[in-house]
Image (cartoon, rainbow, N blue to C red):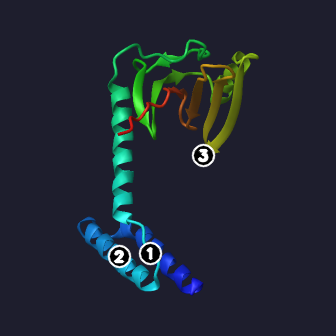
Amino acid sequence: MKSRLFVFVSLIIASFLLTPFLPAQDTDKDVDDAIQEATESAKKMGVKMPDVKKQIEEVNKEEAKEKAALQKQLEASGPVALPDWTPKVPQFKPAGPVSKKIVGDEVDIIQTGTSPLTPAELGDNWEAAKGDKLNSSRTNGSYNDTKVVTIYLSTRQEPLQSVVLEARRAPEDKITHVAISSPLPKPVVEEE
């Protein structure tokens, strides 16, 4: 009996995983059919089926609230600046003003620009500037001969803040493209 239940649950999970690959207009109907079929099978086996539609609606509501909170944080007025302890980038030429941007599930303060120094030199400079008060982590990479150095700096005490420097130079470039970013604190999502 348990093996049948396991197979049944596996089929339900597989149907949900394959659903994103269906054409958009058929997705809702197919999901509804799969949920109905699973509910009927669960009743026959004496298993109480959770209300999957309700759970999906709740997840979608939460995602919409989070997205709205991020958008509100992005559009909020006030000064836009990297933390004041952010190390300077040597010979840095900004590509524009500091701005806010939604990156993944957070709003980041971002400054982009260029420097004639190599990514390794910029990384060394940032590591030397961190001192005793900051945590740091560094990655050095080469992707199709494009050199990339990423330095993560973060405070050790409240308020916890972090800054990331990404320096990238393609083999044919004479300048290094630099992006400095710092995430804003996550916005509080209001509960109903």
Please state which of residues 73 and 174 is positioned toward the viewer in this rendering: 73
Which three-letter amino acid code belongs to the residue tagged 3? Tyr
Tell me which label, 1 or 3, sits earlier in the chain: 1
Q: Report whether 32 appears left or right of 4.
A: left
| Pair 2/3: label in front | 2
Cα distance in 3D space between marks 2 and 3: 44 Å
Q: Where is the C terminus found, in terms of image quarters?
A: top left
Tell me which label, 1 or 2, sits earlier in the chain: 1
- Residue 53 at x, y percent in the picture: 34, 63
Tell me which label, 2 or 3, sits earlier in the chain: 2
| Pair 1/3: label in front | 1
Which residue: 34% across, 48% down?
61
* Element under disc 3: strand
The residue tagged 1 is 12
The residue tagged 2 is 34
- Residue 80 at x, y percent in the picture: 42, 17
Q: Give the label on residue 127, or none.
A: none
Picture layout, residue 79 above or below residue 1: above
- Residue 89 at x, y percent in the picture: 59, 17
Which residue: 35% across, 73% down?
35
The residue tagged 3 is 143
* Element under disc 1: helix
Q: Residue furthest left?
A: 25
Please state which of residues 168 and 42 is positioned toward the viewer in this rendering: 42
Please state which of residues 141 and 57 is positioned toward the viewer in this rendering: 57
Which three-letter amino acid code belongs to the residue tagged 1? Ile
* Element under disc 2: helix
Cα distance in 3D space between marks 1 and 3: 40 Å
Which three-letter amino acid code belongs to the residue tagged 2? Ala
Q: Report whether 113 appears left or right of 146.
A: left
Which residue: 47% across, 71% down?
13
